[in-house]
Image (cartoon, rainbow, N blue to C red):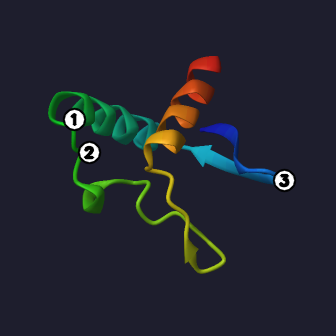
């Protein structure tokens, strides 16, 4: 498991514990996005149920995907 920190907005830090399954899902989604312009099936993704105090936190937007990928490359 890898822990990464993201700053999606000023004064907001999000810490994400990323499992191997989540890394593989991210890679599959990126590959599909690069090939077709659309992401993989979000209903089958381990990232889909990430929530923060009952509110869904979208980590699958393009900006967040890039930030996550950059943080994972640093590890």
Quadrant holding the C terminus: top right
Q: Residue 11 carries which label?
A: 3
Q: From what the image shows, is residue 73 above or below residue 54?
A: above
Q: Looking at the image, is 29 positioned above or below residue 35?
A: below
Q: Residue 32 carries which label?
A: 1
Labels 1 and 3 touching (C-beta < 8 A) = no
Q: Nearer the viewer, residue 58 or 43?
A: 58
Image check: 4 left or right of 36? right
**Label 2 neighbourhood size at 10 Å, few (<14), some (14-19), many (20+)?**
some
Q: Which mark is in front, 1 or 3?
A: 3
Determine the residue positioned at 26% across, 45% down: 39
Q: Residue furthest front?
A: 10
Which sits earlier in the primary sequence, circle 1 or circle 2? 1
Q: In this view, does 15 lie to the left or right of 71?
A: right
Element class at badge 1:
helix
Label 1–label 2 contact, CB within 8 A:
yes
Distance of mark 3 from mark 2, alpha carbons? 29 Å
| Label 1 to label 2: alpha-carbon separation | 6 Å
The residue drawn where x is 55% and y is 64% is: 57
Mark drawn on residue 39: 2
Residue 54: percent from left, percent from top: 59, 80
Helix, strand or loop at label 2? It is loop
As drawn, which residue projects farthest toward the left?
36
Query: Dot 3: within a 10 Å radius of its alpha carbon, few (fewer than 14), some, or many (20 or more) residues?
Result: few
- Secondary element at image label 3: loop
Q: Which residue is drawn at 58% across and 34% down?
A: 67
Q: Where is residue 37 in the image (x, y as percent from the top left)?
A: 21, 37
- Identify which residue, 23 or 70, lies in the foreground: 70
- Let me know if residue 74 appears in the view: yes
How far apart marks 1 and 3 lie (CA) works out to 33 Å
């Amino acid at each position: 498991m890898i822990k990464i920190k993201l700053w999606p907005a000023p004064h907001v830090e999000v810490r994400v514990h990323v499992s191997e399954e989540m890394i593989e899902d991210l890679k599959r989604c990126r590959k599909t996005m690069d090939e077709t312009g659309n992401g993989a099936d979000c209903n089958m993704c381990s990232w889909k149920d990430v929530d923060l105090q009952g509110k869904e936190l979208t980590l699958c937007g393009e900006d967040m995907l890039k930030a996550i990928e950059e943080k994972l490359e640093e590890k």
